[in-house]
Amino acid sequence: MALCYVLLNVELGSEDRVLNEIRKVPNVKDCHRVYGVYDMIAKVEAGTMDSLKELVTWKIRRLEGVRSTLTAIAIE
């Protein structure tokens, strides 16, 4: 099982919409708005690293309103 945390910066005013859309993405286990440098954090799990890469690249980073992301891959 591959696990990562994705920190997101989103366009001002699009936070609620982006949060709702990210929560619909398959394999997103949790997503919350946060205070600080980033606007949101999402926990994403997948069966393989390749699947994880596909989810982050094609399903999360390409959502309208997402300006930038930082992905932290979890290790045991």
Image: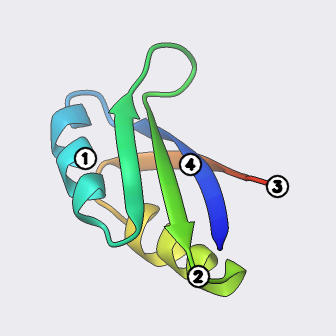
Residue 20 locus on image (x, y percent): 18, 48
User: Is residue 74 shown left or right of residue 60?
Assistant: right
Task: Tell me the residue that label 2 is attached to.
Answer: 47
User: Is residue 49 shown left or right of residue 60?
Assistant: right
Q: Secondary structure at mark 3?
A: loop
Task: Tell me the residue that label 3 is attached to.
Answer: 75
Mark 1 vs mark 3, CA separation in Å: 27 Å
Residue 19 locus on image (x, y percent): 26, 43
**Three-letter amino acid code of the residue under disc 4:** Val
User: Is residue 1 shown left or right of residue 39?
Assistant: right
Mark 2 vs mark 4: which is more N-terminal? 4
**Three-letter amino acid code of the residue under disc 2:** Gly
**Three-letter amino acid code of the residue under disc 1:** Val
Mark 2 vs mark 4, CA separation in Å: 17 Å
Mark 2 vs mark 3: which is more N-terminal? 2
Badge number at residue 18:
1
Q: Secondary structure at mark 4?
A: strand
Task: Tell me the residue that label 4 is attached to.
Answer: 6
Mark 1 vs mark 3: which is more N-terminal? 1
Mark 1 touches mark 3? (CB < 8 Å): no
**Three-letter amino acid code of the residue under disc 3:** Ile
**Rendered view: 36 above or below 65:** above
In this rendering, the label closer to the viewer, 2 or 4: 2
**Rendered view: 58 above or below 12:** below
Indicate the quadrant where residue 4 lies: bottom right
